[in-house]
Amino acid sequence: MRVLRSMLLAVISGCAGFPASGICGEIHVAPDGDDRNPGTLEKPFVTLGRARDAVRALKAAGPGRDFTVQIRGGSYRLRKTVVFGLADGAPDGHTITFAARAGETPVFTAGVPITGWRKVESPPSELPDKAHGKVWWAPVPDGLDRFHTLYDGARRLRRARGNGFKPVGSSPQFRADDQHVLRFPAGAIRNGQGLADVEVVLVTAAPWTMNILPLASVDEAAGVARTSIPGTYALLKPRFGNFPASAWVENTLEALDEPGEWVLDSRARRIYLWPEKDEPGSDIVAPALTELIRVEGAIDYDGPRDTPVRGLVFRGLTFTQADRYTYEKGRVGWGLQHDWEMFDRSTAMVRLRGAEECAIEQCRFADSGAAAVRLDLHCRNNRIDGNVIERVGGVGVLLAGYGPGTKDVNTGNSVTGNHIHHIGELYWHSPAIFAWQSGSNRIANNLIHHTPYSAIAVTGRIAWDREGKGECSRTVRWNEVEAARQADPRDRQDWYERERFLHGRKNMVLRNEIHHAMEIMCDGNGVYISGAGGGNVVRENFIHDCPSEHFGEGIRCDDDQYETVIDRNILWRLGGMATFVCLKGKNYVTGNILAEPLAPPKRGMFSIEAQRYPMEGAKIERNIFYATRRGDKIFEGEKYLPRCEVARNLYFNTADPEWGSRYLTSGRKQDPEQKSLVADPLFVDPASGDFRLKPGSPALTLGFEPINRSVIGLIERPRTEAGAK
């Protein structure tokens, strides 16, 4: 170590071995390197952990400066999570960057090669006849136990899946007394020796939630299975939505009946595979990890102050082939809203937990069972910028702060310029970007498409349940809540009293493009704001071409949500319920374009649900309602409009000139609507999504502000060269 320190000091003092760029403190990593090397370009290290340790020594040996680790292209197989702690943070005012070398693609994978394949000569009795002679097996590599995904190169292989079915029975409630019980039709689930490896996958009675649960027992005669972990809601058929089959079992030999499927027998430590070709390929791997990289400061969970890691940058790296996370016993009350994710858990390939002024930029997250990125607990002023996230099993980007209380330290982060698509492939309920109890963030200029559920969710829904049995209830910081209430008692028990403990306030959801969202699940949206704090702004987003029959709303303010601004968005060609905006509570909807529902709106182009939510002071002003089909309904809940300030809107239907007039005549008792108009807004080319206004548009007389689509979605920006500051 003394020799290494002397060598590093020499490198610092003279910048020896570094390029002529003059950047001191560069270290190099390559797949053909050696951790006994000095880490120069000519003699690089081979592991990220060794480079991390070298930077740590360089920092300790010299004055504060920027450091760069240049990582050569090729594969880096991780068997343990690489952890960056306080000793690895950047000196004040500087950065430590781990970057792909210019023009090269380093790939970090949790995949462990599966070798020793041989054809199954004596088929197990459970194996279908059609699979005889087609299935191969290989031993589970040493060091691996249970895993839930398998990969052939870049492709995630499909785990053997039984025939889909609808659970037997129904309930008027989403919750049942026993959420361990699943009743199934005859033959849908079989009992067997490998039951410990079998999981049931189902959309629950509440069709905005999907569970993957291990089985504890099966009674075939009674048609009853018990899970070892409770479901989020009753394990019944979905209360609504078109799901021909909402449940099935996975990882059973009985279901191994198609090429490309596999099964793990953990007791026998065997992997069974029906290869798509004559024999298994040479690039089949099983994941050793869910979490590949973690940046972790000193978290004082019960205390008022954490110590974050600062100034780390990860640029141009690819992360892949991680496992999905599993539910655990005792998780009740620790899930994030509706169990869409888990609180403070290792569920993503890259995780920041106690970090400030760090960045993940121009990276790629692909072909994995895990979420891509999560920012947990104390995370301030971090950047998730310019990444590609595709074909992952869970959430794209998660920001999850502390639970309700006064410790509010998940703030000021930016999630910008990311291309996120085909996410939630295993947990269908996963939002592409999910901010839970996290505030003052900028979620901007992302392109999001092909999601099974909502595209962007900003939430803070909590069951304020001291027993810890309700949703998210065990995250509540009751000591802080009670101390604050004693210091400042308020004579009210509504959102305005609780809001001071909710951290999801003042988020800016700006200029994102969203299409083909909500392709599978029900009751979700393009942008979803629910149970969060005040001051959230949803502005200048373009949400379009979402044809799924299950699509909910373009933008939705849901239960217990107030003081949200929905401003100057374009909502076009939405299917399903075809509700462009759903309003619950005192929120402000101004200057939006609501155009051309794909299907006759079941709940109207604009839905107001005021049965339980105070609407007084809500605004619906200067919006353009544009339809192309007779009979499209404008408002659902029209009787609640008098509670709102409704003014200066424009209504036009190309197929029905009297469409807007009939509505305004029926609503003349509302004085503000006297200032609304029925007229052609004079869009440039609405059929192709060009909603610029021609000169003389009557919308301009209402104070409508034109929306510039050229600044929405991904915008070409200069790419930072790897290794540059």
Image (cartoon, grey):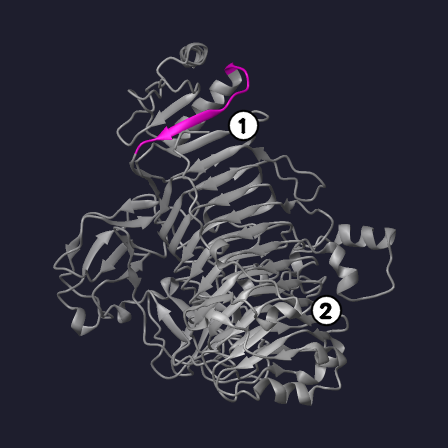
Give, as a three-letter code, the residue at label 2: Lys
User: Which residue is rendered at x = 51% and y = 29% of the image?
Assistant: 95
Residue 524 placed where, x, y %?
A: 52, 70
Judged from the image, the secondary structure of the residue bearing numbered disc 1 is loop
Q: Contact (CB < 8 A) between labels 2 and 1? A: no
Find disc 1 in the rendering and name its residue. Answer: 90
Is 307 drawn above or below residue 231 in the view shown?
above
Residue 567 placed where, x, y %?
A: 62, 63
**Disc 1: CA contacts within 10 A as few (<14), some (14-19) or many (>=20):** many
Return the residue nearer the eye: 706 or 24.
706
User: Which residue is rendered at x = 64% and y = 79% of the image?
Assistant: 677
Look at discs 2 and 1 and give the one toward the viewer. Answer: 2
**Disc 2: CA contacts within 10 A as few (<14), some (14-19) or many (>=20):** many
Residue 99 placed where, x, y %?
A: 40, 33
Is 128 drawn above or below residue 509 in the view shown?
below
Return the residue nearer the eye: 116 or 390.
390
Q: How far apart are marks 2 and 1 (CA)?
A: 44 Å
Residue 522 placed where, x, y %?
A: 49, 74
Label drawn at residue 586: 2
Judged from the image, the secondary structure of the residue bearing numbered disc 2 is loop
Return the residue nearer the eye: 651 or 509.
651
Give, as a three-letter code, the residue at label 1: Ala
Q: Can residue 489 be seen in this view?
A: yes
Q: Is residue 611 visible?
A: no
Label drawn at residue 3: none
Is 234 drawn above or below residue 602 in the view shown?
above
User: Which residues, given as a range, are shown in magenta?
Assistant: 61-72
Of pointers 2 and 1, the one earlier in the residue sequence? 1
- Determine if the magenta segment contains residue 190: no
Q: Quadrant of residue 70?
A: top left
Q: Quadrant of residue 197?
A: bottom left
Marker count (numbered): 2
